[in-house]
Amino acid sequence: MKQNRRKYILVLIGMCGLLASSVGVISNVAGLFFTSVAEELNILKGSVSMTLTVTNLCFALGGVFALRLINENNLRPVLIAGTACIAGPTALLGLSDNILIMYVLNAVRGFAGGILGFVLVTTVINNWFYVSSGLAASAAMSCSGLAGALLSPLLSAVIEYAGWRAGYFVSAAVILLFNLPAILFLPALDPRTKGILPYGCTVPITGSTQTDKGDHRGTKVSGVLFAAVFAYAFLACSGTALPQHFPGITGFWGLSASTGAMMLSAGMIANSTGKIIFGALADRFGAKISMLLYSVLAAAGTLLIWFVHKPAVMYAGACMYGMIYSLGIVAVVILTKDMFGLENYSRTYPVISLAGTVGSAVTAALIGFIFDLSGSYTAALALMLSMILVNIMIILGCYRYRGK
């Protein structure tokens, strides 16, 4: 095992890069372009924010087909083709003058991002890491937020000084850079096909690495619980759409564009670190307590952004609100496992995850249209706060129902 440690590190770096590009670049910094594109093309901001809706919906669809399209024989060609289908349309967005063409380009890069996104990454990590798979998965997922945090001020400066078209060209180059480690260093979906044992495994094992480790006791799938977790995922992931509008929110309050970019960076930093901290808290105090704590922090962050319009306070509010990413990704996984057990996880999580993706996609456009109709972000912030409060009640209800 020790002699192959470098292989596992390189594989993990590759998975971090895939999520940094497929989520961090094409979704988490998308909001930086909304205002500039809307103003230059003379269209509604809601119409531009709809591009993120298209991206996220196609991302979800790509995830459904990921493991049907990828196998051990075509892994590298698919990685290369997928990278081209993310970076290429991103660059072409910088040449576009028509919003309908932008929808098509975002559909292509969203679908490709879904193929190279969460489903592929978590499958590879579960196969390559027999132990520490949770830590490895958290690290990879955190890179989606870390990429957003690091790129937000860079792209904001590019857009400010060179225009939004240049911003898309830079984004395309970054995508190529992030995906390169996976193309170069991922030899197989399952290391055993190359005669390599998963990390932490000292004896040969058969079947799915994840299945062999799993606890198969599970629980019977309750229709009531399934509906509740489905609703939780939809609302929690809907909340992740708000940070993309931070630049617009600061502009509405009369603050600078750099303030909005820094808010987005603060939210992305919370996105990255919050996921790892959430896992540690859940192991120490339980998932229920951790979810409630993060929900309260996100609610408090919403109130700060809503009522206190000073940059330093809004940075703090954005950081607190950034905990919503953990609630929309890591907590959904844990809640699904807690409510239905690992035995039922594989047939419940894909549908629940799809609900979250749809929620995020729909809300990204909804916030933009709310602003177009009302001329204010007040109603959108009130909606986000209401969703968080409803989810607190769902969390309490789910664990109480399961206890009975």
Image (spheres, grey):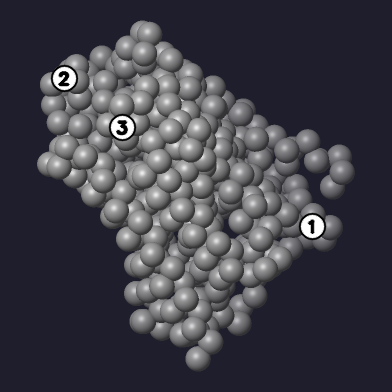
Looking at the image, tell me whether mark 3 or mark 2 is earlier in sequence order: 2
> Residue at position x 49%, y 25% from top?
151
Residue 373, x across and y down, in percent: 12, 41
Crowd around label 3: few <14 · some 14–19 · many ≥20 (10 Å) = some
User: Could you say which quadrant of the image residue 114 lies in?
Assistant: top left
Mark 1 or 2: in front is: 2
**Dividing the picture into quarters, in which one does residue 72 lie?**
top right
> At x 50% / y 91%, what residue is drawn?
404
Which residue is at the front of the view, 293 or 311? 311
Residue at mark 2: 41
Q: Which mark is residue 64?
A: none
Residue behind mark 3: 253
Q: Amino acid at mark 1?
A: Cys
Nearer to us of marks 3 and 1 is 3
Whether residue 228 appears in this view of the structure is yes
Q: Compared with residue 265, is residue 210 higher up or lower down, i.e. above or below?
A: below
Looking at this view, is 289 or 28 the one in front? 289
| Amino acid type of the residue that numbered disc 3 sits on in the rendered structure | Trp
Checking the image for residue 201, the label placed there is 1
Q: Nearer the viewer, residue 326 or 64?
A: 326
- Disc 3 to disc 2, C-alpha distance: 23 Å
State the SS at label 2: helix
Q: Residue 296: give x, y in percent of width and height.
A: 49, 60
* Dot 3: element: loop
Few, some or many C-alpha atoms within 10 Å of disc 1 (few <14, some 14-19, many ≥20)? Answer: some
- Point 19% across, 17% down: residue: 40
